Amino acid sequence: MPEQAKTLTIIVPCFNEQEVIFETAKELSAIVNTMIKKQQVSDQSRILFVDDGSKDTTWDCIQQLSTSNPLATGIKFSRNFGHQNALIAGLTVVQDHTDMAITIDADLQDDVNVIPDMVAEYHKGAQVVYGVRNNRETDTWFKRRTAMAFYGLMKRFGVDMVPNHADYRLLGQVAIKGLLKYRERNLFLRGVVPLVGYPSAKVYYARKERYAGKSKYPLRKMLNFAIDGISSFSIAPIRAIMYLGMTIVLMSIVLMAYTLVQHALGHVNAGWSSLMISIWFLGGVQLVSLSIIGEYVGKVFTEVKERPRFEIETDLYTAQLPTITHAS
Ligand code: UDP
Ligand code: MG
């Protein structure tokens, strides 16, 4: 083992997770305790639950855990800020107190047994270790297909994402600090993490069913997430409108010439159908185009306000731990 074991903090975002949280704490503690015993990580290592404004008893569970389990600690948001912001908040509070952090969902869908492998990759020099699932059998056909379409689309738009990687990853302190320099409100971590750079590695695992409770990502949220992902990274949709507009203009010039010639030859067309079709078609194109532009204007609107990404109401974590600094 190197000079001194490094500190690991596991960040677990929780939104109405009372059914799973005790089991999650149990499994994560078992892993972390074993690693502490083997001196793979220091005894300052912690499991940080981020309560993202749960409406159920999640926070009570976290408080209970923090007294009964020496590894467990938590922070509580003043309201629901969303999964991505919960991760950012976790990384923000741990950045000066840990050598590395692993983010993992509360529902035990991601295999906790690869945590030691992630830490091993960190010791080999990776600042970012992606957890990648090598199966998607537990997802519905629909979720698999839409996910694939999404990766394909993102790739076309030039966003370098790791396929089949969700938000299960290890970040070294240097990468955490790097990531936190990205100040955007519409934060799409999966797209931003690769932009931070530094050496990275992947560990593979099989994703399981949710241990209990329901998915907090219904179709509507998934769709919004995808649209946010695309519009936060690329202006390709606006480009596409430009090309579409130019094509339609060209088509209408050809059509105009055709109509004029017909007129000159005396074949006058009553033209009701063509008129209706073009009005509806162009109306549709214009609405879609406007909404795409609106999407970006909306992004600018939310970004310029620079509202905070989260608000911590209670912090059981920070006071407990000493500061760690790495030259970056
Ligand atoms: N989550 C959160 N805030 C939210 C929604 C979800 O912190 O507004 C957490 C949730 O508790 C879980 C993780 O984000 O730990 C992933 O959510 P979920 O498992 O419901 O998503 P899925 O795996 O179905 O995509
Ligand atoms: Mg899940």
Image: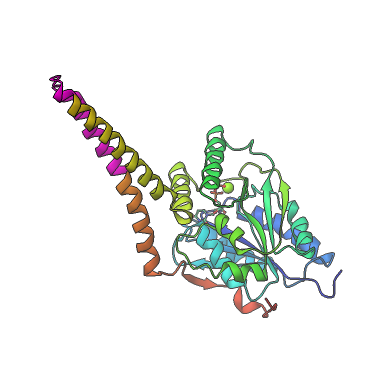
* Residue at the farthest right position: 1
Whether residue 51 is visible, yes or no, is no
Q: Main secondary structure of the magenta part?
A: helix
Q: Position of residue 153 (x, y in %)?
A: 51, 43
Relative side of 176 to 203, left or right: left
Q: Look at the image and tell me in which quarter the N terminus lies.
A: bottom right
* Residue at the farthest top position: 267
Whether residue 83 is visible, yes or no, is yes
Residue at 44 percent of width and 49 percent of height: 236
Residue 68 appears in which quarter of the rendering?
Answer: bottom right
Total labels: the figure holds 0
Residue 308 appears in which quarter of the rendering?
Answer: bottom left
Which one is nearer the viewer's eye here, 202 or 7?
Answer: 202
Q: Position of residue 118 (x, y in %)?
A: 74, 58
The magenta stretch spans which residues?
A: 262-288
Residue at 45 percent of width and 67 percent of height: 78
Which one is nearer the viewer's eye here, 244 or 110?
Answer: 244
Q: Look at the image and tell me in which quarter the C terminus lies.
A: bottom right
Relative side of 148 to 201, left or right: left
